[in-house]
Image: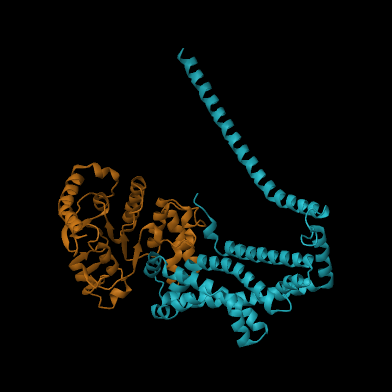
Amino acid sequence: MTGSATELERVATATGDEVLDEALHALDAAERRRRRLDVTLAVATPAALLVMWQAAADTHWIDPKIFTPPTTIARSAGHLIAAGTLQSDLAITLARLVVGFAVGAAAGIVVGILLGLSRPLRSAFSPLFTGLYAVPQIALLPLLLVIFGVGETAKVLTVVAVTFFVLEINVVRAVRGFDPRLVEAGHAYGARRLRLFRHVLLPGIMPAIFTGLRVSIALALVVITATEFVASTNGLGYLVWNSWQLFEPDYMYVGLITIALVGVVLTGIIVAAERLALPWLRRSRP
Amino acid sequence: MIVAHGISKAFVGRKAASVVALRNVDLCVDRGTFVSLIGPSGCGKSTLLRILGGLERPSSGTIDMAPGRGADATETVKTAFVFQDHSLFPWLTVLDNVAFGLRMAGVPKAVRRERARMWLARVGLAGFERHYPEELSGGMRQRLSLARAFVTDPDILLMDEPMGSLDAQTRLLVQEDLIRLWEETRKTVLLVTHSIDEALLLGDRVVVMTARPGQVKLDLRIELGRPRTMAITGERAFGELKAKIWEALRDEVERSLELT
């Protein structure tokens, strides 16, 4: 009697485990289906919009002279590439952007650290910088043109300015808000002065630096595009602006799409560099 | 060995009213002794520890860590801190966190890595070398803090409420680890704690401090046998010592509540 009762219990437990396994499998499968749907929707939605755009323009439901259909844009892009102008505009905008961004970021990081560490320097410059940051950097362009003339310097400096302020503000905040317990731990384990800076403060503010880089690259692209609208005879901004003036919307679309791609690629590079440089940030708790 | 004499410390308060954290504290700790320092919040026990570790200067008083070896000898005495777990460097791997002190001391990479690995194994963290502190549980992080201190082979270990952020059960486990490590190494240890149980379980001596300004109120030698385990917390002698310490501490805790 007792033997069969134990047998019965074992069967019951086994069935219980099987039911649980089945339930877990069903949950996994449902999650996988939802993820597949996420990817499908993310790809299919823009594709469907493009097809609708093309169809609407072909049937003249929207004005194809203003809303150039995708196939025509692609053809125009082909013309610009064959003529070599798209490449040279892209190269010139990238050069301005990268030089201005590198100079502005380096200066912003150095000044941010100095202001973060030194109270007198902070008292002297922080209110000034905060006030200057409130002025849209593009509004400085006419002044820069007066000072430096219409050469490259003025154009690059608008990018330098916007990048500098974003980095400076981010770094000052990170240095001032730095966890004093980490400084103390560094101190207790023999890191003084320069080594405290190199091994504790600098790695600790890297996340803030990368946040600043990510924010400022987007702003820098806005600023260089606007600068090229009004003060340039080359570059992607000029391509867009000139296409408007000549009423060639197909070239305008090519310029806009290229600018968007530049933004996506540069942001992607910064995000990838952040992942590589700060592996400890993306690891989550087990 | 630590001979601290007449240590006082005053802080300038935010509204210019200065606060006396420590007044005239004398403390003598023999080599290889484990001393638990207990007192109400804000009584200056952490400040005392930080002064002894050279992280802060006393307003007055003298510290001699190498009696009879001249004034400069104190400088050569190596101390190591164990803080609460959020003082680990989140950007360094577990291995590099342990090796940090050795790196600052100029120990070659291969040597410091080997010693760090050895200590990670001793605190039960072998296999986690390449993880980051954030990926570990609270108890594991605290073991990591212990390894980071022990690896530097200090003459004196200063522990500032190392288990303060652990839950009660994890705390018991890490306390057992600490007992084992101490009984193996017999370092001079000064432990600041809020827990009477912890003070008794670990200490050869328990020093009770008064409410601010901190002074030594009671200095009790703990004659419980070693090696110790959690089992002694159930012994009669343990209970009696606990009652005695609480009696001394109770008034001070009440006074510290009136102060704030």
If the image is split into quadrants, where does the C terminus of chain B sit?
bottom left
Question: Height in image: B124 above or below A178?
Answer: above
Residue at the spot 77% in from the left edge and 66% down from the top edge: A249
Left or right, residue A276 beside residue B7: right
Viewer-nearest residue: B239 or A144: A144
Viewer-nearest residue: A55 or B51: A55
Residue at the spot 71% in from the left edge and 52% down from the top edge: A46
Tell me how many marks there are: 0
Q: Position of residue A247 (x, y in %)?
A: 78, 69
Left or right, residue B64 beside residue A233: left
Left or right, residue A30 beside residue B143: right
Q: Position of residue B143 (x, y in %)?
A: 40, 54
If the image is split into quadrants, where does the N terminus of chain B sit?
bottom left
Question: Height in image: A30 above or below A104?
Answer: above
Query: Colour scheme used in the picture?
Result: by chain
Q: Position of residue A119 (x, y in %)?
A: 39, 77
Q: Give the residue furthest to the top.
A: A1
- Residue A258, quarter of picture: bottom right
Q: Position of residue B245 (x, y in %)?
A: 18, 52
Q: Is residue A200 visible?
A: no
Residue at the spot 31% in from the left edge and 75% down from the top edge: B75
Viewer-nearest residue: A58 or A134: A58
Question: Height in image: B156 above or below B162?
Answer: below
Residue at the spot 61% in from the left edge and 69% down from the top edge: A217
Q: Which chain is orange?
A: B
Q: Is residue A248 visible?
A: yes
Q: Which chain is cyan?
A: A
Question: Height in image: A253 above or below B59?
Answer: above
- Residue A26, quarter of picture: top right
